[in-house]
Amino acid sequence: MKGVFFVLILIAMLITLGVLATGIIGMARGGDFNAKYGNKLMRARVIAQGVALALFALAVLAGAQD
């Protein structure tokens, strides 16, 4: 069970990193892409971070139950 949480947390963290990097690069370049997708990428990053933190909390709680 710990391995499953580890993989899910790792995937959520990589998704967060990808969305963050895309947002930073888009913001640095500016232009149409940033105007169109800047807020959507920010929302997606916050959601991905929330999912990663929720998975981490569940993993900690599941570990405390053992």
Image (cartoon, rainbow, N blue to C red):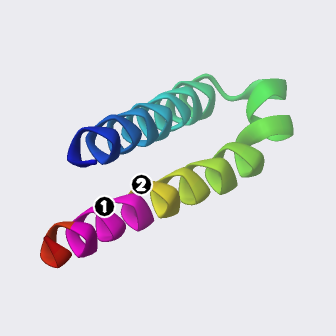
Snapshot quadrant of residue 14: top left
Spot the residue most to the front. 66
Q: Mark 2 and mark 1 in contact? Answer it, CB < 8 Å.
A: yes
The tag on residue 7 is none
Residue 66 in the image: state x and y as whole percent: 13, 70
Asked whether residue 56 is drawn in magenta, I would say: yes
Name the side, left or right, on which 17 lies relative to 60: right
Q: Amino acid at mark 2?
A: Ala
Relative to the observer, which residue lies in front, 53 or 25? 53
Relative to the observer, which residue lies in front, 33 or 7? 7
Q: Amino acid at mark 1?
A: Phe
- Dominant SS of magenta comes to helix
Find numbered disc 1 in the image and state the secondary structure of the residue it sits on. helix
Q: Give me the residue at 67% from left, 43% from top.
A: 41
Per the rendered image, the range of residues in magenta is: 53-62
Snapshot quadrant of residue 4: top left
Residue 34 in the image: state x and y as whole percent: 74, 34
Reply above or below: 10 against 39.
Answer: above
Relative to the observer, which residue lies in front, 6 or 30? 6
To which residue does mark 1 refer? 56
- Crowding near the residue tagged with mark 1, few <14, some 14–19, many ≥20 C-alpha atoms within 10 Å: some
Asked whether residue 59 is drawn in magenta, I would say: yes
Reply above or below: 25 against 38.
Answer: above
Snapshot quadrant of residue 32: top right
Q: Give me the residue at 51% from left, 58% from top.
A: 51
Reply above or below: 46 against 19.
Answer: below
Q: Give me the residue at 49% from left, 28% from top.
A: 18
Q: Give me the residue at 19% from left, 77% from top.
A: 65
Residue 45 in the image: state x and y as whole percent: 56, 49
To which residue does mark 2 refer? 52
Reply above or below: 58 against 45.
Answer: below
